[in-house]
Image (cartoon, helix red, strand yellow):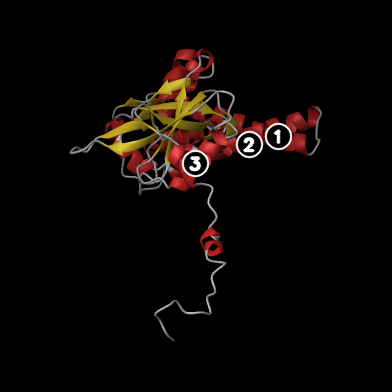
């Protein structure tokens, strides 16, 4: 991916923090309004899924569209009836179980709409915790990027605060109200607990999977325990890049727990690599191993 100048946009469900990108929907509206929102979101999702299936099967025409619309409406009505029925379960020890269930289903439906991927970046290359948590305990590397002007609006800064709440009233209008959409997006994608503040995280949000990088690769930093062969391999892979990449390595600051970034000289590595293990055997090829060395007997 370094050679191809690509980035991997991960599914937030795979993040090590299970609360990351998992907001709570706050039911600040009536049950009837919650039903309307939930019904609309379910219908939209089912319609999209069935239209995709119909396209792959080459089904088209007004009958197909009508069938999809009826089926989507039926699925939404069925879900609402299921919620009303389950709300009568005496196991729910709360004042309004139907309101609770509607809010929970709305939360699940909201998250289904967020199928985007995330690339995470840290603002500090010298953070010891980042190297230990994400740099394979200093055996890995850190890739440093600059932000071109045309990509600056694609980067989003994480907010570190306690609340994960999203108002249902914002979900209701997010499709046609940019301010509400931003509030929901921020709560779903750009909010983490304050204990993660050390990461100083920024995020790129886009289509999941491998994508071309909108940022500019500027440097590669190797961990303290990074293997010399890996350093050499990455250096050789990137040395002829059209825009040169700088190379650094992490070193300890003597007498402290701090790290410092130092420019790496590949002259010594270039003298040793690439190596051939059997060179040592060939160096002794002209010796007669059947004749014991002078002064020894068998």
Q: Position of residue 49 (x, y in %)?
A: 66, 35
Q: Are marks 1 and 2 in contact (CB under 8 Å)?
A: no
Q: Position of residue 97 (x, y in %)?
A: 38, 39
The answer, for residue 32, to whether it is visible in the render is no
- Of 87 and 108, the residue lying toward us: 108
SS state under label 3 = helix
Residue lying farthest bottom? 298
- The residue pinned by badge 2 equals 74
Question: Marks 1 and 2, Cα distance to the nearest angstrom?
Answer: 18 Å
Mark 2, mark 3: which one is toward the viewer? Answer: 3
Residue corresponding to mark 3: 270
Residue at position x 49%, y 29% in the image:
35
Q: Quadrant of residue 127?
A: top left
Decide: is 11 above or below 228. above
Q: Which residue is mark 1?
A: 52
Q: Picture coordinates of residue 43 (x, y %)?
A: 60, 31
Q: Is residue 93 visible?
A: yes
Q: Is residue 244 left or right of residue 264?
A: right
Residue in the foreground of this view, choosing between 258 and 166: 258
Which circle's residue, 2 or 3, is located before the other in the chain?
Answer: 2
Tell me which label, 1 or 2, sits earlier in the chain: 1
* Residue at 19%, 37% in the rendered image: 256
- Which is nearer the eye, 193 or 147? 147
The alpha-carbon separation of the residues under discs 3 and 1 comes to: 54 Å
Mark 2, Cα crowd under 10 Å, few <14 / some 14-19 / many 20+, is some
- Please state, as top left, top right, bottom left or bottom right, where the C terminus lies in the image: bottom left
Tell us which disc is closer to us: 3 or 1.
3
């Amino acid at each position: 991916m370094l050679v191809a100048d690509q980035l991997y946009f991960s599914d937030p469900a795979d993040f090590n923090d299970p609360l990351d990108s998992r907001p709570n929907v706050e039911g600040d509206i009536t049950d009837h309004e919650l039903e309307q929102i939930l019904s609309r979101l379910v219908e939209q999702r089912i319609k999209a899924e069935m239209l995709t299936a119909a396209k792959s099967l080459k089904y088209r025409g007004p009958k197909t569209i009508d069938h999809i619309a009826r089926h989507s409406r039926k699925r939404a009505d069925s879900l609402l009836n299921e919620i009303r029925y389950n709300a009568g379960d005496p196991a729910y020890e709360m004042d309004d179980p139907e309101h609770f269930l509607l809010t929970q289903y709305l939360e699940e439906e909201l998250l289904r709409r967020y199928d985007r991927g995330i690339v995470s970046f840290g603002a500090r290359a010298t953070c010891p915790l980042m190297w230990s948590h994400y740099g394979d305990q200093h055996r890995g590397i850190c890739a440093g990027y600059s932000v071109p002007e045309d990509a600056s609006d694609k980067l989003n800064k994480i907010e570190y605060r306690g609340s994960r709440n999203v108002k249902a009233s914002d979900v209701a209008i997010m499709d046609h109200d940019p301010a509400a959409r931003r509030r929901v997006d921020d709560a779903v994608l750009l909010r983490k607990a304050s204990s993660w503040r050390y990461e100083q995280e920024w995020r790129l949000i886009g289509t999941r999977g491998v994508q071309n990088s909108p940022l500019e690769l500027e440097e590669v930093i190797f961990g303290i325990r990074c293997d010399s062969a890996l350093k050499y391999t990455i250096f050789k892979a990137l040395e002829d890049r059209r825009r040169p990449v700088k190379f650094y390595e992490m070193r300890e600051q003597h007498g402290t727990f701090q790290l410092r970034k130092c420019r790496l000289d590949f002259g010594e590595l270039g003298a040793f690599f690439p190596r051939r293990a059997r060179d040592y055997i060939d160096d002794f090829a002209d010796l007669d191993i059947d004749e014991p060395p002078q002064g020894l007997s068998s």
